[in-house]
Amino acid sequence: MNDNKLIFSLAIGVIVLFGLFMLLTGGEEESVTVIVSNEPIQENPIPEPTVPAAPVVEVIEEVEPALNVLSEELVEFAEEIVAVVETLVEPEPVEPILPSLNNSDDFVKEALTVMDGGSSLIMHLVSEELVRKFVVMVENISRGEFPEQNLPMLYPEERMAVTELGSDFYLIDEQSYQRFNSLVAGLTNVSTATAVDFYQRLQPLFRQAYAELGLRNSEFNDVFILAIDKVLDARTAPQPQQLIRPNLNYLYANPEIENYSDVEKLLLRLGPENTENLQRRLEFFKRRLELDASLAN
C-alpha cells in the first residue's frame, strides 16, 4: 500500500467512527415502563396534572454544540494521524544520474568505493575506459576467447612460477595460483545482490558500449549470460600440469589441454580454489539476474 492509499484509509476510518457515534447517540427514544398492580381500577380517575414537555428545539440547541466539539476533535485527531504517518514514511532514495560513456570512469570508481565489498576492487582496475573494456572482455569470453590487452583489470605483474623437470619439461608451481588470490577475492567479496544492482544500473552504458562494436544481432545482457556460461561450463584438468617451452611462451605438454579455449586455460592458471570461488559467485549472479528478469515479466 502506498502513502496516498494509507492516508485515504485512515481518513475513511475516522469518518466511519464518526458515523457510528452518531448512530449510537442520536435517535434514542424514551423507554416505556409497564407497571402491573392488583389495585382496582377507578372508574373516574382524577387526572394528574401534566408537566409540559421541553421543546425539542431546545434539546437540539443543547446537543448541537457538543456534536460540533466532537466533530472538531475527530478532525484534529485525523489530522494528527496523517501527520504521524507522513513522518514515518521514508522518501525513496534517488538514483544518481548516469554520466556519459566517455565520462563514466570516475562514476564507476566512486560507486565501487562506497559499495559493500567493492572498495577492494579499486586497486585491480585500470584508470580509464572501464566500461568499454569490460564490454569487450565480456564479448571475447562469450566466444571462449580472452583478450591479452585492453583489459578492465590489471593483470598480475608476477610471472608464472615453474619448476624445471629437465628435458625441456616444466611443472607449474602451485604458488603461481596466489598471484590471482587478491583479484578473485575482490570479485567475490561483493555480495550477489549488490553486484546485480550495480550491473543493472550500468546497463545503459553497457548497451551503448556494446553498440559501438557494431554487433547488432544480439543484446549485451544475452552476451553477458553466455560469457558466464562459458566460465561455468569450462573443462578442468588435474593440477599441476606439465608445460613445455618451445619459444618464449609456455605451452601445456598435453596437446588436448593445449587445445582448450583461452578461457579454460585461464581458469587453469587461476588454480582450483580460485576457479571454484569465481564460478560459485557467477552462478549466484546468474540466478539472481534470471530471477529479477522473471519477476519483471
Image: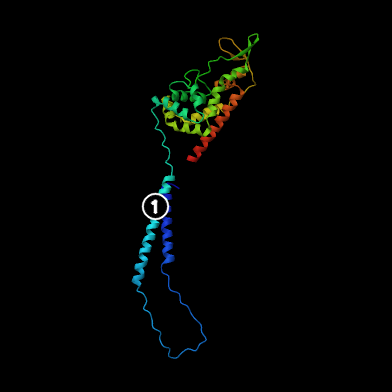
* 57 to 286, vertically: above or below: below
Q: How many marks?
A: 1
Q: Residue at x 49, y 22 (%)?
A: 123
Q: Is residue 257 visible?
A: yes
Mark 1 burial class by Cα count in 10 Å: few <14, some 14-19, many 20+: some
Q: Residue at x 35, y 68 (%)?
A: 60
* Camera-side residue of 208 and 178: 178
Locate residue 211, reporting x and y percent.
42, 27
Locate residue 53, reporting x and y percent.
37, 76
Please, what secondary structure does the residue beneath circle 1 have?
helix
Q: Is residue 235 visible?
A: no
* Camera-side residue of 57 and 268: 57
Query: In this image, 223 relative to 99: left or right?
Result: right
Locate residue 284, reporting x and y percent.
55, 33
Query: In this image, 45 relative to 166: left or right?
Result: left
* 226 to 92, vertically: above or below: above
* 147 to 190, vertically: above or below: above
Q: Quarter-wise, where is residue 96 in the image? A: top left
User: Disc 1 marks which residue?
Assistant: 79
Amino acid at pointer 1: Glu
Q: Residue at x 56, y 31 (%)?
A: 283
Q: How is the image coloured?
A: rainbow
Q: Quarter-wise, where is residue 264 in the image? A: top right
Q: Residue at x 41, y 46 (%)?
A: 86
**Which residue of the protein is positioned furthest toward the bottom in this rendering?**
43
**Which residue of the protein is positioned furthest toward the top in this rendering?**
167
Locate residue 157, reporting x and y percent.
53, 15
